[in-house]
Image (tube, rainbow, N blue to C red):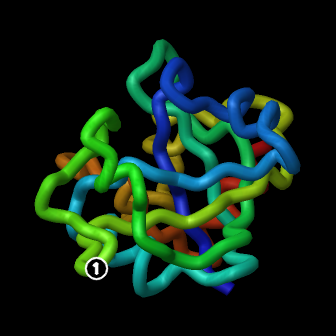
Amino acid sequence: MNYWLMKSEPDVFGIDHLASRSGQTEHWDGVRNYQARNMLRDQMRLGDQVFFYHSNCKVPGIVGIAEIVRAGYPDHTAWNPDSKYYDPKSTAEKPIWYMVDVRLVRKLKRTISLEELKQRPELAEMPLVRRGNRLSVMPVSPQEWEAILALE
């Protein structure tokens, strides 16, 4: 099993949005970074666990846990000219962008803030806390996963 962290803005698609979906499941679309796309397409597997992270908000941080319930498949929003994620270079025959489906496992008891994560020496190598990392999808090591869960 792999572990991941996926960022989303809570006013665009937050954990409460996921909780309100049928089966508490939704596709994770709109990723338009090649490195993050490669993780969605090539590395995420059924059963992988995900920290759901709220970004671009008053207190950015980890707010919940989700699970990958469908491995990477073409992001159809790239083919819709009315979508904000439209990419005319991506087609059904030659998709460029990929997505996965996630299901809510649970909300955390509290938000584990980015500031708190930055203060933990055992998380110093985590991509999230390193300067300049703006990826919306990133791997989490098993040791980092356990250390973060212990903060809850």
Asked which quadrant contains residue 112, the reply is top right
Q: Please state, as top left, top right, bottom left or bottom right, where the C terminus lies in the image.
A: top right
Q: Camera-side residue: 87 or 66?
A: 87
The spot of residue 128 in percent (x, y) is 39, 52
Residue designated by label 1: 93
- Residue 64 sits in which quadrant? top right
Q: Which is more toward the observer, 33 or 92?
A: 92
- Which image quarter holds the N terminus? bottom right
Q: Residue furthest top?
A: 58
Is residue 8 toward the left or the right of residue 146 in the image? Answer: left
Closer to the camera in the image, 6 or 33: 33
In the depicted structure, whether residue 12 falls above or below residue 119: above
How far across and how far down the image is residue 83, in percent?
33, 37
User: Going by the image, does 17 lie left or right of 120?
Assistant: right
Q: Residue drawn at (33%, 68%), measured in percent from left and top? A: 37
Q: Is residue 100 left or right of residue 110?
A: left
Q: Is residue 129 visible?
A: no
Q: Is residue 96 above or below residue 50?
A: below
Residue pictured at 39% horizontal, 75% vertical:
39
Outermost residue on the left side: it is 89
Q: Residue at x 61, y 41 (%)?
A: 62
Amino acid beneath label 1: Glu
Up-down: is 73 above or below 20?
A: below
Q: Position of residue 35 (x, y in %)?
A: 25, 70
**Residue visible at 59% across and 54% down?**
27
Q: Is residue 124 visible?
A: yes
Q: SS for tag 1?
A: loop
